[in-house]
Image (spheres, grey):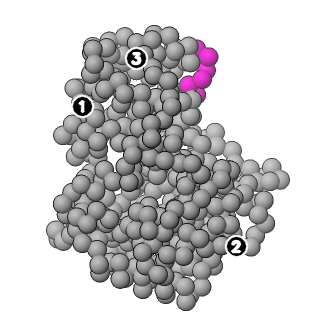
């Protein structure tokens, strides 16, 4: 299916439309997302027209030409419009080979994403100092609050709308968790590198190891999760009508295993959004339920959330290090679950321990009613599955080759 967006003229957009949006204040805090990044030049392959974006104290300046650009990229007019319409992302264009770096480091283009979305869509850059989350009584929200499935529905709905996620304790029994673990073990044994439905990584010893398996709804113990009344009730908390995927679909049910000391592949995720490979305009919002089979601790490879980020955008960045945002760390255990909007920024860094146990989770996805893949493919993440050993290529490696 082809989205019905009006065709944009690259020159007119930069000479008239974008300057007007900036003057009207419709580009939010775009400059904040590009601080310390240098200027970005975008050149259109058909005809060679180009413009440069430069973040200044008063906002983002749009300059004709690209001589002053610290980083210069070239892409087709259609690929550029995909960015403007929020159908594509810098990462999706990189992985699909639809952007070429002419000058500078292409990872700067990826980091410019937050500012580009603010410029093109008015979606503000995440600013923790300005996030003011409130409960239904107007009091400051506790972003780490734990709930039970039978808690007040309106309280749950409000928290999800504010924070973009929910954390529930005791959602599944020990017997159910045991069944999930058995199914996960069988899937682990059956997966093979390059089967196009699993992700593999290499540890420091060079061993190819499974970290995620897709299409897990094929297992009897997991097939009923998309229609489980408990999960359907959570999907009904969303502001948009959400529907489950068919259990046999690739993106319906999956299993992930956190692993320590990984040198190659995508086992550890920086701050990211689930629509980072494109399709936000035709797919989102999405909801993802994570059912924990093991501990969610830093030692185990902890899932974290940026509260209030699901209606903003954020610069792709690491979740560990001196200047990294810690986010909210929910102390989930076996049988607990979280539900989050795919637009919300979350991270899954490496375990801090080499001993284990490490986190393992069942992921169940829900989609917006009427959502579709504008590329006509099976899943937006399919582009990540090209490696013959089942490994997802590091974005930095892709950028260096483009």
Residue ranking furthest to the bottom: 175
Residue ranking furthest to the right: 137
Q: Classify 10 Å Cα crowding around label 2: few (below 14), some (14-19), many (20 and above).
A: some
In the rendered structure, which disc, 2 or 1, sits on the residue that comes first in sequence?
1
Residue 315 screen position, x and y as percent: 44, 40
Determine whether label 2 and label 1 are within 8 Å by CB: no
Read off the residue under disc 2: 148
- Real-space Cα distance between discs 2 and 3? 51 Å
Task: Place residue 184 in its image quadrant.
Answer: bottom left
In this rendering, the answer to whether 234 lies above or below 37 is below
- Real-space Cα distance between discs 1 and 3? 18 Å
- Real-space Cα distance between discs 2 and 1? 49 Å
Q: Which mark is residue 100?
A: 1
| Magenta residues (range) | 23-28
Callout 3: SS: helix
In this rendering, the answer to whether 211 lies above or below 219 is above
Main SS of the magenta part reads loop
Q: Which mark is residue 10?
A: 3
Mark whose residue sits in front, 2 or 1: 1
Residue ranking furthest to the left: 206
């Amino acid at each position: 299916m082809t989205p019905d967006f009006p065709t944009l003229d690259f020159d007119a957009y930069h000479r008239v439309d974008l300057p007007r949006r900036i003057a009207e204040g419709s580009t939010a805090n775009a400059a904040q997302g590009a601080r310390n990044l240098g200027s970005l030049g975008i050149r259109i392959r058909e005809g060679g027209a180009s413009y440069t974006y430069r973040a200044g104290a008063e906002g983002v300046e749009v300059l004709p030409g690209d001589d002053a650009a610290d980083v210069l990229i070239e892409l087709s007019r259609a690929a550029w419009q995909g960015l403007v319409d929020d159908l594509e992302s810098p990462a999706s264009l990189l992985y699909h080979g639809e952007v070429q770096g002419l000058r500078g480091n292409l990872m700067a283009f990826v980091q410019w994403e937050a500012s580009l979305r603010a410029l093109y869509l008015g979606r503000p850059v995440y600013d923790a100092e300005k996030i003011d989350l409130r409960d239904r009584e107007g009091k400051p929200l506790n972003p780490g609050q734990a709930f039970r499935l039978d808690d007040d529905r309106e309280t749950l709905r409000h928290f999800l709308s504010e924070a973009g996620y929910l954390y529930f304790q005791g959602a599944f029994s020990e017997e159910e968790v045991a069944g999930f673990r058995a199914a996960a073990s069988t899937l682990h044994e059956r997966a093979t590198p390059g089967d196009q439905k699993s992700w593999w990584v290499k540890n420091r010893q060079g061993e190819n190891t499974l970290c995620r398996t897709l299409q897990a709804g094929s297992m009897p113990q997991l097939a009923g999760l998309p229609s489980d009344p408990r999960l359907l009730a959570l999907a009904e908390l969303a502001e948009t009508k959400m529907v489950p995927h068919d259990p046999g679909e690739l993106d319906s049910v999956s299993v992930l295993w956190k692993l320590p000391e990984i040198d190659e592949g995508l086992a550890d995720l920086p701050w990211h959004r689930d629509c980072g490979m494109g399709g936000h305009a035709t797919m989102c919002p999405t909801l993802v339920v994570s059912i924990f089979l093991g501990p969610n601790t830093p030692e185990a490879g902890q899932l974290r959330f940026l509260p209030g980020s699901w209606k903003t955008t954020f610069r792709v960045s690491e979740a560990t290090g001196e200047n990294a945002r810690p986010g909210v760390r929910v102390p989930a255990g076996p049988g607990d679950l979280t539900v989050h909007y795919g637009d919300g920024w979350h991270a899954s860094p490496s375990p801090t321990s080499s001993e284990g146990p490490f986190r393992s989770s069942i992921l169940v996805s829900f989609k917006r009613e009427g959502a579709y893949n504008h590329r006509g493919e099976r899943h937006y993440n399919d582009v990540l599955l090209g490696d013959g050993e089942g490994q997802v290529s590091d974005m930095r490696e892709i950028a260096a080759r483009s």
